[in-house]
Amino acid sequence: MNALIQYLSGTTASVLSIIFIVFTIAALGYMVGGIKIKGIGLGTAGVLLVGLLYGILISYFPDITIGPRTIHLNGAAMLADYKLISGMGTALFVTAIGLIAGPKFFRIMNKSSLSYLLTGIIVIGIGSLLVLLFIKLDHKLSPEMAVGLMTGALTSTPGLSSAKEVAQDQGALVAGYGIAYIFGILGVVLFVQIIPKILKVNITEEREHFVAANTVAIPELKRKAKKLDPYGFCAFFITVSLGCILGAFRIPGINFSLGKSGGTLIIGLIIGHFGRVGPINCRIQKDSLNFLRELGLVLFLIGCGVPGGINFISNVHLSYFLYGAAITLIPMITGFLIAKYVFKLSIFNNLGSITGGMTSTPALGTLIETAGTDEVASAYAATYPIALVAVVIATKIILMIE
């Protein structure tokens, strides 16, 4: 009997190990993402949905005990594992985006670049005004809960971290983030697919024009640089490391930092532009970067999805959920319309800029799939940094004035 219990305990622990869970969620997520209704599907974001459902499920069944062993499915250690997975995914995805966009990013800077910056500021500005409005209209809504809803609706973890430094009620802040986060991701993912259909965009034609407009000659490296491995992994890992170092620096006073996402994006753009670090050749094959980008996105979605499901059930509140949905939809739609009719951005540049303004990593992945070209990453890369800075500053201002 003891032998059977030990066997069952060991088997259960293996089946419920973090490795098994991550790969099972990923496999099921791709199956769900492959389902399309009238041409619209979740794609890789299906992984997020499965992760959320798993998080909701284990919130009802937190512990499993067999013999002497207790398995904590949503304990602190397990949640820390998902945080690590999310962080690694972010680093892989954003670094790949930076390296993909880098060779052309600085060489195609033009008047559209100002439009990208303004789009990011507009999106965050409208979101901030909505938060202040909701606080005034709903006296039960605390500033901490409202700012949490804002950071969740804009899927901005750096914004949440920044707000924690001045928030008095951190529990409400984190709860708000968890409530709004699910719609914050899925809303933008669906938006970048639905809008081209509403506008009856000819994707093939638009892609040809878009790629032609973004065609630029990439110069050969001036001096001979050494490639240390056939896939460019060494160069990629160097980029991630330098990005993490940059992201760790904090600006005194406002205590602002780029974080892993901002740091790796900027270093990726720079190294992608120059193509080398000292004597090391950092020109990496597109196939390798696409693989790392997709792997990073999957890990990010799982690392955020499972804890998001747990937090959603424990903190769900209908009116707060609606506030969060409004903070996602209104800035996104308004920003899109301004970019289209005022800035005259093409559909792919527009949507790329919106994903950056909404700081939405998963939506960029979906847009790349929808557009059929990763050139859209340039608009994201141009908008994301200003949006990141704006949301970090906005959260602190709102908490300090309320």
Image (tube, grey):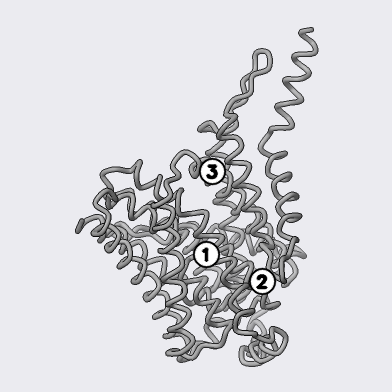
Residue at image coords 52%, 81%: 350
Q: Earlier in the sequence, mark 1 or mark 2?
A: 2
Q: Is residue 91 something that shows in the picture?
A: yes
Mark 2, secondary structure of its residue: strand
Residue at image coords 55%, 77%: 351
**CB-based contact (under 8 Å), mark 3 and mark 1:** no
Q: Please, what is the three-letter code of the amino acid marked with disc 1?
A: Ser
Q: Tell me the crowding category of disc 1: few under 14, some 14 to 19, or many 20 or more residues within 10 angstroms, Cα based.
A: many
Q: Tell me the crowding category of disc 2: few under 14, some 14 to 19, or many 20 or more residues within 10 angstroms, Cα based.
A: many
Q: Please, what is the three-letter code of the amino acid marked with disc 3?
A: Pro
Cα distance between the residues tagged 3 and 1: 18 Å
x then y, percent, for residue 274: 58, 78
Residue 342 found in image quarter: bottom left
Residue 364 found in image quarter: bottom right
x then y, percent, for residue 322: 42, 57
Q: Which residue is mark 3?
A: 307
User: Camera-side residue: 328 or 293?
Assistant: 328
Q: Which residue is mark 1?
A: 360
Cα distance between the residues tagged 2 and 3: 39 Å
- Quarter the C terminus occupies: bottom left
- Judge left or right: residue 392 versus residue 27: left
Q: Name, please, the residue furthest toward the top.
A: 1
Residue 32 found in image quarter: bottom right
x then y, percent, for residue 214: 61, 88
Residue at image coords 54%, 73%: 269
Residue at image coords 68%, 17%: 66
As drawn, the label of residue 281 is: 2
Mark 3, secondary structure of its residue: helix
User: Camera-side residue: 366 or 92?
Assistant: 366
